[in-house]
Image (spheres, rainbow, N blue to C red):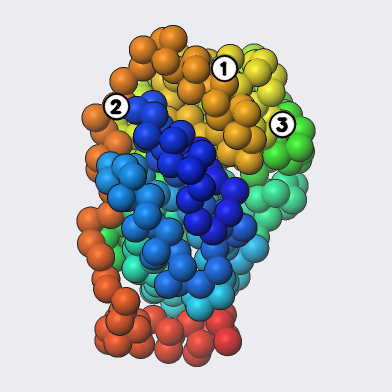
Amino acid sequence: MLDIAGTWLTAEDRQILRQPEVAGLILFARNIECPRQVRELAASIRAVRPDLLLAVDQEGGRVQRLRQGFVRLPAMLAIADNINAEALAEHCGWLMATEVLAAGLDLSFAPVLDLDHQRSAVVGSRAFEGDPQRATQLAGAFICGMAAAGMAATGKHFPGHGWAEADSHVAIPVDERSLEQIRAVDLQPFAQLSTQLAAVMPAHVIYPQVDSQPAGFSRRWLQDILRGELAFKGVIFSDDLSMAGAHVVGDAACRIEAALSAGCDMGLVCNDRGAAELALEALQRLKVVVPQGLGRMRRQAFPGVEYRQNPRWQEAMGALRAAQLID
């Protein structure tokens, strides 16, 4: 999965999207102007490759790429203190998924299942809670809302990014805790929601008591624990392999090979077209085929452009306004 630079496709973009090793495209804020423009961009991408997965990060709070003409959802941590928090989380999941699907996209990489240990600035208010049981309840409600709208859920960042203090976008975070400590706390939302998740995205965090490699490059984490212990059968997306936390294994060719060898089904290479081309060359040498399971991530419904007339929309907006979570 790669990205593009602007709000429309260039000839170079079309050429690279035709490569069979490209199976998805992720949009960032720079690609987005308004709902109509996103729909037109999505249609132009599908005209080149109808099978591509089109993704975005639309969690709520500060991680919300679709803004102008879209609901500004609250940070998930703001929901937890409300008496009807689970209902509000479900409303947020439904609203988010409905707007993303109506824009012509397939999925948002959500929800965040990291716990708020008040240590990680990059997680912080993106988490639902610090308590694993409460976080699981609220994330489960959010997933129910997504499913009702027709979107598959992706839990991130396995097995939990909330304890490591460094930001994996710019550094290589380390979580020194034992597997038993992680399993008892941060792993709980992933374990309890594993059957409701269609996909998981591992963290660019090293857990040295478990493996010397970051989780996204670790067969121990992805094969033994996620596939084995948790019996997870869905898709595994790498986090962005251009992030500093991924550089520990070498250049983009080494990173994509390491991620797929560890058990990832799809590697994301973003914000660096040269790196994406290097990764594609590596995949061509490896003769990698697109995994069958990716189809389950495609949108299951299209709400249409008049989705704000849906009674559920009115109910969800009314509930979030009453809780003073949106304007």
Callout 1 environment at 10 Å: few (<14), some (14 to 19), or many (20+)? Answer: some
- Residue pictured at 35% horizontal, 21% vertical: 228
Callout 3 environment at 10 Å: few (<14), some (14 to 19), or many (20+)? Answer: some
Q: Is residue 77 above or below residue 312?
A: above
Q: Which of 268 and 116 is in front in this view?
A: 268
Q: Is residue 103 above or below residue 321?
A: above
Q: Is mark 1 on a helix, strand or loop?
A: helix
Query: Quadrant of residue 288 in the image?
Result: top left
Q: Earlier in the sequence, mark 1 or mark 3?
A: 3
Q: Which amino acid does label 1 sit on?
A: Ala
Q: Residue 253 carries which label?
A: 1
Q: Is mark 2 on a helix, strand or loop?
A: loop
Q: Residue 291 carries which label?
A: 2
- Residue for badge 3: 244
- Residue pictured at 45% horizontal, 64% vertical: 38
Instruction: From the viewer's perspective, tell me whether residue 296 is left or right of residue 30.
Output: left
